[in-house]
Amino acid sequence: MKAMIFAAGLGTRFKPWTDKHPKALALVNGKSLLQRNIEWLKAHGIDDVIVNVHHFPEQVMEAIETNKGWGSKVTISDEKGQLLETGGGLKKAKSFFDTDQPFMTINVDILTDLDLGKLTRFHAQNKPLISFAVTNRKTSRYFLFDKDLRLCGWQNTNTGEEKISIQKDHLLPKAYSCVVIFEPRIFSMMKQEGKFSLVDVYLDLAAKNKILAFDHTGDKFVDVGKPEALLLAEKLFQ
């Protein structure tokens, strides 16, 4: 299996670090977020990775080259001209992936000890178009699922905004972990072009395609979106 690490973001919530550096190179106990995710993937047998770059891209590319990809084969997807978000970034990287094999994506600022073997087996057994990891943690934006953990919608509890793909009673809110397995046919199904989010793709496709949640509540998980999250990350990830 191949994987993509989304590392192109501006990291506006991570200032002042991101005034001079990409968030991907922020350190947790001496290792960058990018290094930790590459090593985590490699520990689960995934050592062929593509990383998209936009904000201080030369720093990211230099770190990868200097450290010889931390033992993995690392390809760069160059978004210097335009930041494409997760959906557009994935679509741009289409040629990297095998046409007949599932693949994985993760955001660079996510740290977790999720067992990728369990997620991969879940995907193989249930045969959805997309499987993504979720937990029961508190957040402001939730995906909504039926009792079988099939994706039905999305909501923002701060704004009240809601997008429903499948109308059902008693939908279950779960927090998105940004660790995803896709079937390769996803590329022919993404109708969006240019800059767009994977969330839009999920909600567009959910009504007619099986998109499932894999609940890994209880695993270590930190969204290192803001500098204060580094303290928690350093406690959990040595």
Image (cartoon, rainbow, N blue to C red):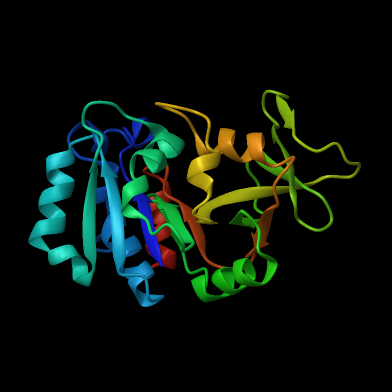
Residue 198 in view, yes or no:
yes
Which quadrant is home to the N terminus?
bottom left
Q: Position of residue 57 (x, y in %)?
A: 18, 39
Image height check: is 26 above or below 219? above
Q: Nearer the viewer, residue 83 or 13?
A: 83
Q: Position of residue 187 (x, y in %)?
A: 48, 44
Left or right: residue 55 versus residue 208 is left
All told, the count of numbered labels is 0
Left or right: residue 228 versus residue 212 is left
Quarter where residue 75 is shown: bottom left
Q: Nearer the viewer, residue 161 or 165?
A: 165
* Residue drawn 74% across the image and 40% down it: 207
Q: Nearer the viewer, residue 88 or 177?
A: 88
Left or right: residue 167 versus residue 131 is right
* Residue drawn 88% across the image and 41% down it: 168
Residue 226 in view, yes or no:
no
Quarter where residue 72 is shown: bottom left
Image height check: is 150 above or below 199? below
Image height check: is 7 above or below 80? below
Left or right: residue 19 versus residue 88 is left
Q: Position of residue 100 (x, y in %)?
A: 46, 62
Which quadrant is home to the C terminus?
bottom left
* Residue drawn 18% across the image and 63% down it: 69
Quarter where residue 71 is shown: bottom left
Q: Position of residue 106 (x, y in %)?
A: 43, 53
